[in-house]
Image (cartoon, rainbow, N blue to C red):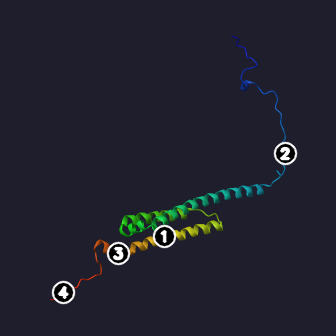
Amino acid sequence: MNNSRTTWGPLYNRAPTKVVSIPVHFVGSERTRTNSATNIQRVARGFLVRKSVKKMLKMKVELEEIEINVNGEETLKLLKKDQKERLRIGETIMNLLLKLDCVRVFQCYALREFRKSLIKRVIFLQEFVDQIQMVGPTYEDDIVKGNFVGVEEKEDVG
């Protein structure tokens, strides 16, 4: 075995032979700092707006699922009878409203209008659930149970 270095050893141990600098010129690289800053701000703002739109679209899908659930006949009957179910749906709606409130609109008119329309739908749904709570069980539900509310029986006077 020979301890001397050979020329075919690892490349990272070799010293570079010659460094050549290549000048690179870009067409249009004479931009000013303000143009560059404006371009960076425009791209960053677009990213943030798209991110907010994606969040609100997810919330819109969630709102539609809640609306479908509340408008179902089975859920409607359950809401009239069960206080816990009304509370659960009310908290879900309130959570959605708080999430919508946290979305930033970045001075974008269309984004602000979209958020406003979603908030109006959420508030309308909340009021609908509250009206169900105020109405409570209906007259038909009482008849089915055998509780005749408001019906007085007349006694036969002999």
Residue 24 screen position, x and y as percent: 83, 43
Q: CA distance from mark 3 to mark 4?
A: 27 Å
Q: Is residue 112 above or below residue 39?
A: below
Q: CA distance from mark 1 to mark 2?
A: 61 Å
User: Circle 4: is it few (<14), some (14-19), or many (20+) Cα within 10 Å?
Assistant: few
> For numbered disc 2, what is the local secondary structure?
loop
> For numbered disc 1, what is the local secondary structure?
helix
Q: CA distance from mark 3 to mark 2?
A: 84 Å
Q: CA distance from mark 4 to mark 1?
A: 50 Å
N-term-proximal mark, 4 vs 2: 2
User: Circle 3: is it few (<14), some (14-19), or many (20+) Cα within 10 Å?
Assistant: few
For disc 3, the marked residue is 140
Q: Nearer the viewer, mark 4 or mark 2?
A: 4
> For numbered disc 4, what is the local secondary structure?
loop
Q: Nearer the viewer, mark 3 or mark 1?
A: 3
Q: Which mark is residue 125?
A: 1
Q: Nearer the viewer, residue 18 or 76?
A: 76
Q: CA distance from mark 3 to mark 1?
A: 24 Å
The N terminus is located in which quarter?
A: top right
Q: Is residue 4 above or below residue 119?
A: above
For disc 2, the marked residue is 25
